[in-house]
Image (cartoon, rainbow, N blue to C red):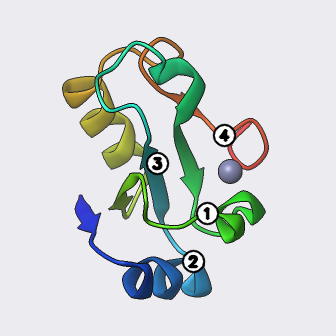
Amino acid sequence: MKEILNDEEFFEVIEKGEGYIYNDFSGQGKSGNLYNILHSADCPYLRRANTGPRKYYFDTLREARDWLIKNRGKEDVNWKKCGFCLR
Ligand SMILES: [Zn+2]
């Protein structure tokens, strides 16, 4: 897991299109199931995003799931996978 610190790093990762990016919009707040979304780095939705909300990078889906379950909670309750790129 690696925190993405600025727009430059963020655009570098989506340009490469490898790995996974988690958009930590609500953190551990209640609306996590709506806005805390894990994407594939090549997801077109990420192209409209910026690093306003904190973002984390993961090499593999497994690493992302393990971290999210440990640090955010249950899938589809505290976070979810993008319905477009990770169905
Ligand atoms: Zn996506």
N-term mark: 1 or 4? 1
Label 4, secondary structure: give it: loop
Q: CA distance from mark 3 to mark 2?
A: 13 Å
Tell me the quarter of the image containing the N terminus.
bottom left
Q: CA distance from mark 1 to mark 2?
A: 10 Å
Using the image, tell me which numbered label, if any, was put on residue 82.
4
Q: Amino acid at mark 4?
A: Cys
N-term mark: 1 or 2? 2
Q: Tell me what residue is drawn at x 30 percent, y 18 percent.
A: 73
For mark 2, what is the residue?
A: 14
Q: CA distance from mark 4 to mark 2?
A: 15 Å
Would you say 8 lies left or right of 38 here? left
- Relative to 66, is 20 above or below? below
N-term mark: 4 or 3? 3
Number of numbered tags placed on the structure image:
4
For mark 1, what is the residue?
A: 49
N-term mark: 3 or 1? 3
Q: CA distance from mark 1 to mark 4?
A: 14 Å
